Amino acid sequence: MSEKRDYYEVLGVDRNASAADIKRSYRKLALQHHPDRNPDDEAAATAFKEAAEAYDVLGDEEKRRQYDQFGHAAFGQGGGFAGRQFTNIEDIFSAFGDIFGGGGGGGGGFGDLFGGRQRARSGPRPGRDLRIVLDLSLEEIDEGVERTVSLKRFETCEPCRGTGGEGGAQPVACDTCGGQGRVQRSQGFFTMATACPACGGAGRRVEKPCGGCRGAGKVQRKSEVKIPVPAGVEEGMQVRQGGAGDVGEPGAPRGDLYCVVRERDHKVFQRSGPDVLAEIPFSFTQLALGDKVEIPTLRGKVEMTIPAGTPSGKILRLRGQGLPVVERSTRGDQLVRVFIEVPTKLTDRQTELLAEFAEIEGEKSGNESFFEKIANYFS
């Protein structure tokens, strides 16, 4: 028998490593050599078991102290697991599942980590979740809306009432797995349960398939679903409608429908979270002298005061005239960016007055033009 490797070497840490470093290193090795990622690889299975054995000792403060003092001899002649034998992968899941976000007791954490490849499924399969895109205007987002959408989804086959068997005949137990839905296979040191290849993990099979659904128990149909959309939703948010997805197998729930929000472009407003921004043109005199004007909002017009001397490009704020915040009683603001609208046609009188204003303005600035000021700045 080959000599057992040093546990610190197995985990790739030094002897002064912290408990957090040891845990982090074990998690990395367990993911790297996990049997789901390395099917039929005995070397990976051996490394997986070896890393678990090392962590069982170094991850326990008292066991680590004994190991540092006596080495493998601290745990008996066989050296490993202090009398506890991990002969299959489920034992390791049960012992260390909490490291991977599961609660132990069967390794749910590993299953979640590897995209749901947990132990073989048993029982009726729930319906599949569906996802659609929901285009909404800012006005609909502001008020909240109920939309009716059309989609194709699987419904129960009426001729067989969802059993998949002709005339509603019930499926029978699978011969391959004996109705268990899973079969055992050995890999290295471990024995793993996998979905039965004959029945796909259902544990049952249809003897004479229904002609309407070809044994599936469901058929695809066009359906209409009402979706209540709360006020204030944002681009990319998902609105969930429970039980509006594909039908499940008999005895299992339907899937859900997820509606991904997509905002339509608006002619006037741009959105920034709960705030909306509008660019509004004003005349020079309005900005120079100040004014009270009516401003469009998502809910009609409101009066806004323009202070005298407001420069072009300044942003004025209308409190509470933005969009609502989802599931809260607060609203954002409307931001109004002002800019000067230059008239393209002037009356003789307007031209005369503007020329007089320009003359007076020139006198106040010492008759120095803007370009002369720029030239003098760099001279």
Image (tube, rainbow, N blue to C red):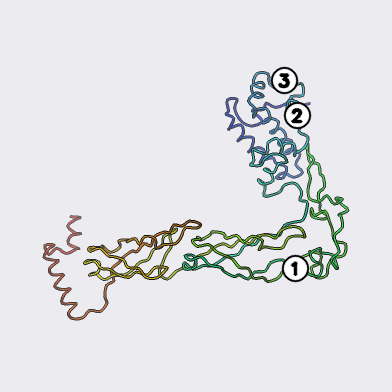
Task: Decide which of tag 1 and tag 2 comes sooner along the chain.
Answer: 2
The location of residue 8, given as percent across then percent down, is 64, 28
Q: Earlier in the sequence, mark 3 or mark 1?
A: 3
Q: Amino acid at mark 1?
A: Val
Give the label on residue 219, or none.
Answer: 1
Image quarter in which the N terminus is found? top right
Residue 109 appears left or right of 84: left
- Report the front residue among 59 and 5: 59
Is residue 210 found left or right of 317 in the rendered image? Answer: right
The quarter holding residue 105 reads top right
Give the residue drawn at x 74%, y 45%. 39
Residue 312, horizontal then vertical, whole percent? 28, 64
User: Does 208 appear above or below 80?
Assistant: below
Q: Amino acid at mark 2?
A: Arg
Q: Is residue 23 left or right of residue 169?
A: left
Decide: few, some or many residues near mark 2? Use Cα within 10 Å; few <14, some 14-19, many ≥20.
few
- Which labelled disc corresponds to residue 84? 2
Question: For the residue labelled by badge 1, is the local secondary structure a helix, a strand or a loop?
Answer: strand
The residue tagged 3 is 73
Q: Are there few (<14), some (14-19), or many (20+) residues within 10 Å of tag 3?
A: few
Q: CA distance from mark 1 to mark 2?
A: 51 Å
Instruction: Find the distance from the CA under tag 2 to the CA under tag 3.
Output: 15 Å
